[in-house]
């Protein structure tokens, strides 16, 4: 098995359009950048505790409502509930909804999927603000570049 190197990632152009893809994902799913990147971090861990969540939040701006927001909006779900005798704490995982979004981001980064360009599936395409209009041009460029 070949070891993956930095040149291999560069040849894939994996991070070339990350900013546009991240902005699309955040805007269409009512997330901010820190929430999205934290979900990606937690998805890599697979099953995690509240302690793992707190360790992951050290590199982001402090938001004491982030945990409850991610739970309420079904980005994180309980995998195993505590029972106060044998299980001392809950174990969590990124929900199906979160995993679908992260996998979609990966597919777009690899060029196997496009960013949606319909008004129904992408709120940016409505072009309500100047930044949305700039993003529309960027999204079209990302979709053209395979």
Image (cartoon, rainbow, N blue to C red):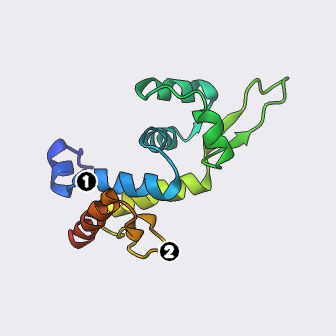
- Identify which residue, 29 or 131, lies in the foreground: 131
As drawn, 8 above or below 48: below
- Identify which residue, 61 or 49, lies in the foreground: 61
- The residue to which callout 2 is attached is 120
- The residue to which callout 1 is attached is 14
Residue 24 pos. (x, y %): 39, 58
Specify the quadrant of the image occupied by residue 58. top left
Q: Residue furthest front?
A: 129
Q: Residue at x 40, y 64 (%)?
A: 128
Real-space Cα separation, disc 1 to disc 2, in angstroms: 27 Å
As drawn, 117 above or below 132: below
Q: Which mark is residue 63?
A: none
Q: Element type at marker 2?
A: loop
Nearer to us of marks 1 and 2 is: 2
Q: Element type at marker 1?
A: loop
Label 1 close to label 2 by CB (< 8 Å): no
Residue 138 pos. (x, y %): 25, 63
As drawn, 83 above or below 18: above
Locate the C terminus by quadrant: bottom left
- Identify which residue, 1 or 83, lies in the foreground: 83
As drawn, 64 above or below 126: above
Q: Residue at x 39, y 69 (%)?
A: 125
Q: Residue at x 30, y 61 (%)?
A: 135
């Amino acid at each position: 098995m070949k070891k993956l190197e930095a040149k291999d990632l560069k040849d894939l152009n994996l991070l070339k359009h990350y900013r546009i893809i991240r902005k699309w994902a955040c805007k269409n799913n009512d997330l901010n950048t820190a929430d999205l990147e934290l979900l990606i971090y937690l998805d890599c861990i697979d099953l995690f505790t509240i302690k793992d969540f707190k360790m992951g939040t050290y590199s982001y701006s402090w938001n004491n409502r982030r945990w409850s927001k991610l739970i309420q909006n079904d980005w994180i779900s309980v995998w195993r509930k505590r029972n106060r005798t044998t299980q001392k704490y809950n174990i969590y995982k990124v929900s199906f909804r979160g995993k679908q979004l992260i996998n979609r981001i990966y597919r777009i980064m690899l060029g196997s999927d496009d960013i949606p360009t319909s008004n129904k599936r992408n709120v940016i395409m409505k072009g309500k603000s100047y930044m949305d209009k700039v993003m529309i041009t960027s999204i079209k460029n990302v979709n053209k570049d395979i």
